[in-house]
Image (cartoon, coloured by chain):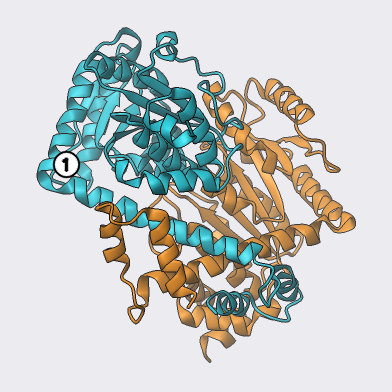
Chain colours: A orange, B cyan
Amino acid sequence: MDLQDRLTSGDSRALARFLTLAENNDPEAARIIKELYSRTGNAYVIGVTGPPGAGKSTLTDKLTKKLRQKGKTVGIIAVDPTSPFTGGALLGDRIRMQDLFTDPGVFIRSMGTRGHLGGLSRATQSAVKAMDIFGKDFIFIETVGVGQSEVDIVKTADTVVMVMVPGLGDDIQAIKAGIMEIGDVFAINKSDRDGADKTKIELEMMLDFSEKKDWRPPIHNVVATTDAGVEELLECIFKHRDYLMDSGEFKKRRYRNTREELINLVKERVLELILKDTGREYNIDDLVSRVLSKQIDIYSAAEEVLGKISG
Amino acid sequence: MDLQDRLTSGDSRALARFLTLAENNDPEAARIIKELYSRTGNAYVIGVTGPPGAGKSTLTDKLTKKLRQKGKTVGIIAVDPTSPFTGGALLGDRIRMQDLFTDPGVFIRSMGTRGHLGGLSRATQSAVKAMDIFGKDFIFIETVGVGQSEVDIVKTADTVVMVMVPGLGDDIQAIKAGIMEIGDVFAINKSDRDGADKTKIELEMMLDFSEKKDWRPPIHNVVATTDAGVEELLECIFKHRDYLMDSGEFKKRRYRNTREELINLVKERVLELILKDTGREYNIDDLVSRVLSKQIDIYSAAEEVLGKISG
């Protein structure tokens, strides 16, 4: 059987192989995704983000267990922009629950900065498609929420769970402020620690001050390590899904994300044209030299490139 | 006098106006930059980055004072991806040294997420050009180093000063690990605190394990608030500049950055073509709908857009 057939017949090793191809922008992966495109769009994608040390992996694992108990299959994409490693199931020093690895209904994939082409965001989107085609019911995208690129990645999810933790310093809170707005559901993990109530009050206040929307993100206290509140958090994610479906917001989100992805794909292809097409009448390196020696300004140089690639 | 003449005659209000135009991708700003392009490339650009709370603003201010004492003019671009504000000299709640504001040889500009078009990275590059044309000898780009986008911004500097602080938690250290490699000079600020020696040893170890280069980033202990070690840090920045010049690395860096900028400019212009050109034979929103309804796969859709814009 070829890769495509093995993939649709549920062979996990085929998925692993397919993910590697997809992350590397391999033409074979693109061909398979094209071929099986009608199978995409069925998985529900949950983003899990928050500051480092908030316990995102543990919480994702516990949510996964609950979904498995309900008979759902799960894919986990653990994105770590600070890790050089891509591929395999372990990311850096983050230890995941052992029994997830032996469960054929769960597939875990790590995503670091190296080992794929076209950027982390692109690789994550390809991985989501691969798991979606494979037939996973739920896909988690788990990432540290500290910068714009990570925000961009997690924004492609249907429901974004923002994981907070009591007693973080003000500096970390400042980082969070900028990304608060992408949270659909808030989880205060490690809620058995001092300061959980204070953190909840602060979050409620932030939400009071932010732009009013039809869906006000609920805030849940959880202790991922003891499973406390995890079932309620999952119910809350389902509630958000119901809200998205009933309000038409689901279609709008998927539309926005697909539009964004399409535009990025075109930009990437243009980049390939700029850099790789040696048959064209210009040379990018020659242009750069002319800019540096002030023979041409950079805006005119950009127009020159554009004129050539747009024929 | 028009804006261009006022700018080249050293009118600070003209610079403020020019910066606003440049941040907004205003055609007038592009016209002026084109016109005065031969005046760019003279300022030495210093990036200052590090985790939140490391005291980057204070350190930048103290370095600025030292440069002023040497008769140099300075521009400061304070980038904060978590702040919604752009323009003016104050960023969020960060209080800068009062006497810098009254010094005509210093120009401070804040850069938040809103109030400019084309992304923070693009806006920062335009601001650097504006200050460069204006005639500033040194330009600081100061930003929180927590994500890829901030790393991309600070990478455009000639010398990158990585500001550390003793006693940060392991989680923050993990974030730093991913961006360590862009530091040319390390400063351990607040070195009067416990743990400064330990932090220095840890940094030296990290450098021992990282890829060997001709320039090994030196590590300096400073206390920005009391000025201790700031002069030595500045000397070290000069030493790095000398190294860049003597080794030919300076030209290589500027080449790499100009190439990157040129490619990004082309990508942006392509994006404009995709989104704004209504005279073309396709409709991006229609294509997105066809992708969502699985009439076409997203890769074929991207090819379709590309075919149209490249004639």
In this orientation, which residue lies closer to the viewer: A307 or A168? A307
Can you name the residue that lies furthest to the front here? B1
Where residue B136 appears, as percent x and y from the top left, is: 32, 29
Q: Which amino acid does label 1 sit on?
A: Leu
Q: State the SS at label 1.
A: helix
Subunit under mark 1? B
Residue at x 44%, y 42% (from the top left corner): B126
Query: Who's the residue at 64% across and 75% down the image?
Result: A133
Q: Residue furthest right?
A: A246
Residue B156 visible from this viewpoint: yes
Picture coordinates of residue B76 (x, y %)?
40, 27
Eyeballing the image, is A127 above or below A48?
Answer: below
- Residue corresponding to mark 1: B244
Residue B122 visible in rendering: no
Please report the residue visible at 67 percent of the width from the left and 68 percent of the height from the top.
Answer: A136
Instruction: Residue B309: name its quadrant.
Output: bottom right
**In front: B68, or A53?**
B68
Q: Residue at 71%, 70% (x, y): give it.
A: B288
